[in-house]
Image: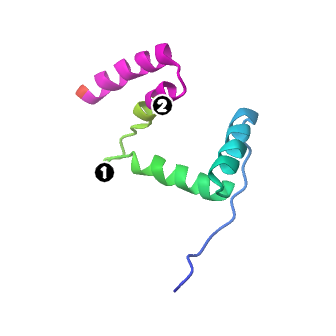
Amino acid sequence: MKKKEVKACYFRLPANLKQRLDKLSKKSAKPKSKLIIEALEAYFENYDSDGEDFSFAIDALEELKDGNYDKASKKIDKAVKKLQK
């Protein structure tokens, strides 16, 4: 089985994202690098073939998941309007 070529990437994260990443890594028993790779792959999959960004819909779902119903409602309304165009 052939190994995939990998490249190193270094970047800074806001403290709150780093804390969330640490917690998720412990909870899921997955390395942080794997979680970041999965997140990037999911993000890139949310672009359609024309390169349209659907992250606005994902943001709304994240707010809903986190219990921020007012923010989620506003973002969902914006997402629906955008998708109806």
Report the residue that reaches farthest toward the bottom.
Answer: 1
Q: What colour scheme has been applied to the protein in the rendered image? A: rainbow
Q: Nearer the viewer, residue 50 or 44?
A: 44
Residue type at tag 1: Ser
Q: Which residue is mark 2?
A: 59
Q: Amino acid at mark 2?
A: Asp
CA–CA distance between discs 1 and 2? Answer: 20 Å
User: Please, is residue 58 above or below residue 32 in the view?
Assistant: above
Residue 53 makes an appearance in the image: yes
Q: Residue furthest left?
A: 84
Residue located beneath label 1 in the image: 49
Residue 9 colored magenta?
no
Mark 1 Cα shell of 10 Å, populated few (<14), some (14-19), many (≥20)? few
User: Residue at (49%, 54%) from the top-left corner?
Assistant: 41
State left or right for residue 34 relative to residue 78. right
Q: Point out residue 40 in the picture as x, y percentages from the top left corner.
A: 53, 51
Location of the C terminus by quadrant is top left
Where is residue 36 drawn, in percent x and y?
61, 52
**Label 2 Cα crowd, 10 Å radius (few <14 / some 14-19 / many 20+):** some
Q: Which residues are magenta?
A: 60-83
**Does 64 appear in magenta?**
yes
Give the residue at x 72% y 49%. Answer: 11
Q: Main secondary structure of the magenta part?
A: helix
Counting residues from the start of the chain, the first of labels 1 and 2 encountered is: 1
Per the image, label 1 sits on a secondary structure element best described as loop
Query: Which quarter of the picture shows residue 24?
Result: top right
Who's the residue at 62% across and 71% down the image? 6
